[in-house]
Each structure stands twice: as C-alpha cells, then as structure tokens.
Image (cartoon, rainbow, N blue to C red):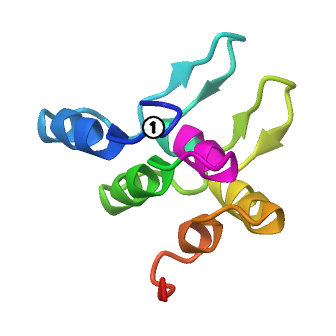
Amino acid sequence: MRWGKTGAAAMATTLIDGAADVNAVGKDGGGNETTPLWWAAVSVSGGEAGALPLAALLIAKGADVNVVGKDRLGAQSTPLWCAANAVCLGRPGGLQLAWPSFPSS
C-alpha cells in the first residue's frame, strides 16, 4: 500500500475505518521514518496509478500535509515538494495533490 498501487485507497479505507492512525510513522528498508501521506505523495511523483486516490483519502482523513520524509538517498521533502516534482516531470496527479480542489478537467 505504501507505494500507492491500484486498490491502496480501498485498503486504507478499511484500515482507517478500523481506527488506524493516518499519521502513524513507519520505517522504510533504509530506516528512514515517515508517514503514509509522504509515501503516497512520493508515489504520485513516481507516476503510480493508485497514489492520488490514496493521498486524497489520507488528506481528507486528517493526515499531516507538512510531514517531512527522507528518500532512500537521504534527501528530505514534503508532500507539496513531491507534488511539484510530479508536475515538473509531467506525471498525472501532481497538480491535484498540490491543490486538491483544482478541477480535473
């Protein structure tokens, strides 16, 4: 689910309905700590199809949009930075992640 694969939002909904914390901190394989929203935003930047619905769900459920995470190289970023990166790379969903109320055409 952390990589925003298709169906991740449905799985997250089940977990959130069961009282999962949308701001729970987890570690990646390199020991870097961050939250589900950060991983979803990274996945939007990477072009994963299910990432935007997952990020939107987490934001709607109160996820901290200012969380700072580190990638596997140690570079820090926020979900907004990931959204800007997605726009720069021409990936779908970047603008909607940065501005959730933006019309999707």
- Is 59 left, or right, of 94 in this rendering? left
- Image vertical order of residue 98 relative to residue 37, above or below: below
Q: Residue at x 85, y 27 (%)?
A: 74
Q: Residue at x 71, y 54 (%)?
A: 82
- Is 90 or 94 nearer to us in this picture? 90
Q: Which residue is mark 1?
A: 5
Is residue 42 part of the magenta span, yes or no?
yes
What secondary structure is marked by label 1?
A: loop
Q: Residue at x 54, y 57 (%)?
A: 65
Q: Quadrant of residue 23?
A: top left
Q: Position of residue 90 (x, y in %)?
A: 76, 66
Q: Position of residue 67 (x, y in %)?
A: 61, 47
What is the span of residues highlighted in magenta in the rendered image?
A: 39-48
- Is 5 left, or right, of 74 in this rendering? left
Q: Amino acid at mark 1?
A: Lys
- Is 52 left, or right, of 13 in this rendering? right
